[in-house]
Image (tube, rainbow, N blue to C red):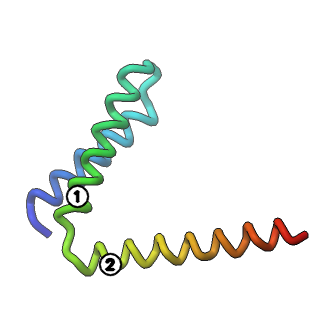
């Protein structure tokens, strides 16, 4: 893991922690935006097999969600 990836992940985690623990609205939103930017940057610089694994997780979750929604609709 490169140093840029570790720094980006640390910034994203700090932003997430701050957005959950700050009571002021503007500060919370700024921390949330910083967390999202850090996570996106980390995803962009991640190795291809990590990106593929995350894509498979999303596809499996969405497929499961679609089947559960159809089962509820049929009842």
Compare residues 47 and 2 and report the one nearer the observer: 47
| Residue situated furthest left in the rendering | 3
Mark 2 crowd level (few <14, some 14–19, many ≥20, 10 Å Cα): few
**Quadrant including the C terminus:** bottom right
- Which of disc 2 and disc 1 is earlier in sequence? 1
Residue 63 spot, x, y in % from top left: 59, 75
Residue 4 spot, x, y in % from top left: 10, 57
Residue 19 spot, x, y in % from top left: 40, 34
Q: Is residue 35 left or right of residue 66?
A: left
Compare residues 31 and 58 and report the one nearer the observer: 58
Residue drawn at (9%, 60%) of the image: 3
Residue 51, picture quadrant = bottom left
Q: CA distance from mark 1 to mark 2?
A: 14 Å
Does 48 sit above or below residue 33?
below
Kind of element beneath mark 1: helix
Disc 2 target residue: 52
- Badge number at residue 42: 1
């Amino acid at each position: 893991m490169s140093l840029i990836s570790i720094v980006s992940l640390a910034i994203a985690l700090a932003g997430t922690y701050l957005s959950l623990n700050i009571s002021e609205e503007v500060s919370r939103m700024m921390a949330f935006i910083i967390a999202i930017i850090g996570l996106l940057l980390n995803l962009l610089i991640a190795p291809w097999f990590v990106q593929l694994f995350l894509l498979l997780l999303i596809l499996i979750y969405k497929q499961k969600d679609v089947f559960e929604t159809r089962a509820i609709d049929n009842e």
